[in-house]
């Protein structure tokens, strides 16, 4: 997901902040400074950092549970609705997804329970708490309870929505379950936007966020289920134009103009990949001169895919690497194709127009 930046790493997972989360923090900080001065701003920023720690702990609840089922999580994005752990894949078995979804809010239940024991306040005492006059621990308890309650709303992609999808998947199968859960998520998004307009502008931001997240999740899921059973060879562009390692920027521009390709595999004398050069890199280097610049100096290193790799894994790899294209090699390690986001989008268009369409493999003949 765009609009986020990395702030640290824990146990192989990058922690990224979504800009709307920062916006929320800034807004609260500024509002408190305006009404209560520096001391109020410092105390509210300290409080925000504690909330931030609880949200992160929540996410690591999901991440640790997913790891039990062999699913790694390269990154987690913290947003106003509690963060999204960007897992490598969704656990295949619905009950595993259910447990992974539950593990996050469960962390906040544990935190809230410990804090409640610490303050001696009862849960019913919490409901008529005066937030302004309450102690830091009481307020933090309240936040953890709210985190649980909010995440249990069955608005996909929030945890409640994921739980719902997992339960639906047990009966309807994963594709249909995602569709139903995403629709419901979009419905909740409209409701939040509507409530936000009249009551609380934060709900407006949350609503917009949920809408886009639900839509993205639905598309990603549709892609996964369409790609299931296909290989990279079914989707790749066969025999792309290649650039030799010692080619110049002028050669690359010539290749760009004489083909419809945007990404060019750079290969050694044995047609094995050494890098990938895209249109943006060419054009930006052209501005600073140097037509004779070797392409080897401007190409990007790239992950390669194998013709026989499952397409759903390859799609995931493109997404994780934030890549628009990746080089495909055959059994002998030589370049045979190029898999681009556009190829996949075209196949999706054909698939949605004709779900029964049979795609043929373009693997190199041996
Ligand atoms: Zn969660």
Image (spheres, helix red, strand yellow):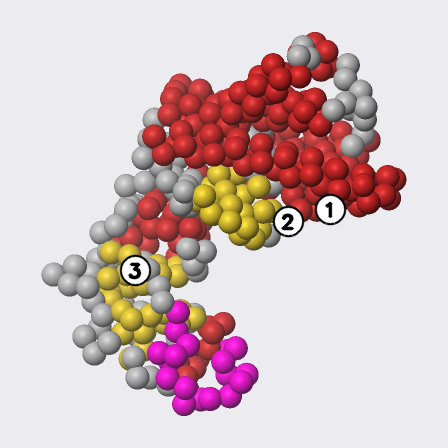
Q: x, y percentage for residue 59? A: 51, 34
The quadrant where residue 46 appears = top right
**Residue 9 lies within the magenta run:** no
Q: x, y percentage for residue 282? A: 46, 77
Position of residue 247 relative to residue 204, above or below, is below
Label 1 packing within 10 angstroms: few (<14), some (14-19), many (20+): few
**For marks 2 and 1 on the same chain, the one whose residue lies earlier in the sequence:** 2
Q: Which residue is mark 1?
A: 26
Q: Which residue is mark 2?
A: 19
Label 2 packing within 10 angstroms: few (<14), some (14-19), many (20+): some
Position of residue 193 relative to residue 10, above or below, is above
Residue at the far right in the pictured view:
35
Q: Which residue is mark 3?
A: 304
Tell me the SS state at disc 3: strand
Mark-to-mark CA distance, 1 and 3:
41 Å
Tell me the SS state at disc 2: helix
**Residue 293 lies within the magenta run:** yes
Q: Residue at x 55, y 83 (%)?
A: 287
Q: x, y percentage for residue 178? A: 47, 31
Mark-to-mark CA distance, 2 and 1:
10 Å
**In the image shown, does 205 or 69 lie closer to the viewer?**
69
Residue 346 in view in this figure: no
- Which quadrant would the C terminus be assigned to in this image? bottom left
Residue at the far left in the pictured view:
366
Please state the extent of the stretch shown in magenta in the rendering: 283-300
**For marks 2 and 3 on the same chain, the one whose residue lies earlier in the sequence:** 2
Q: Residue at x 43, y 71 (%)?
A: 278
Q: x, y percentage for residue 144? A: 62, 25
**In the image shown, does 211 or 351 lie closer to the viewer?**
211
Q: Residue at x 68, y 24 (%)?
A: 137
């Amino acid at each position: 997901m765009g609009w986020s930046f990395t702030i640290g790493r824990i146990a192989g997972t990058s922690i990224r902040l979504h800009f709307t989360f920062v916006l929320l923090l800034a807004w609260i900080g500024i509002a408190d400074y305006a009404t209560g001065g520096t001391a109020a701003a410092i105390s509210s920023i300290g409080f925000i950092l504690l909330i931030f720690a609880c949200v992160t702990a929540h996410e690591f609840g999901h991440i640790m549970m997913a790891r039990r089922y062999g699913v790694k999580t390269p990154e987690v994005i913290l947003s106003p609705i509690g963060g999204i752990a960007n897992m490598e894949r969704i656990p295949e078995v619905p009950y595993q997804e259910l447990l992974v979804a539950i593990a996050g809010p469960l962390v906040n239940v544990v935190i809230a329970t410990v804090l409640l024991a610490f303050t001696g306040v009862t849960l019913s005492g919490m409901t008529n708490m005066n937030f302004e006059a309450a102690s830091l621990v009481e307020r933090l308890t309240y936040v953890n309870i709210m985190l649980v309650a909010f995440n249990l709303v069955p608005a996909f992609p929030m945890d409640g929505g994921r739980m719902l999808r997992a339960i639906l998947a047990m009966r309807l199968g994963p594709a249909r379950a995602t569709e139903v859960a995403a629709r419901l998520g979009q419905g909740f998004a409209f409701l939040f936007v509507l409530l936000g307009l009249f009551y609380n502008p934060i709900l407006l931001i949350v609503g917009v966020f949920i809408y886009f997240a639900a839509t993205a999740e639905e598309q990603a899921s549709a892609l996964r289920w369409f790609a299931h059973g296909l290989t990279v060879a079914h989707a790749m562009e066969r025999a792309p134009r290649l650039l030799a390692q010692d080619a110049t920027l002028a050669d690359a521009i010539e290749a760009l103009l004489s083909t419809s390709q945007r990404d060019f595999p750079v290969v050694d004398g044995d047609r094995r990949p050494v890098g990938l050069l895209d249109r943006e890199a060419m054009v930006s280097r052209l501005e600073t001169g140097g037509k004779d610049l070797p392409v080897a100096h401007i190409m990007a290193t790239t992950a390669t895919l194998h013709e026989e790799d499952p397409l759903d894994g390859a799609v995931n790899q493109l997404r994780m690497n934030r890549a628009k294209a990746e080089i495909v090699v055959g059994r002998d390690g030589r370049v045979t194709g190029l898999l681009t986001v556009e190829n996949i989008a075209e196949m999706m268009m054909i698939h949605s127009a004709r779900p029964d369409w049979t795609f043929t493999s373009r693997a190199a003949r041996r």
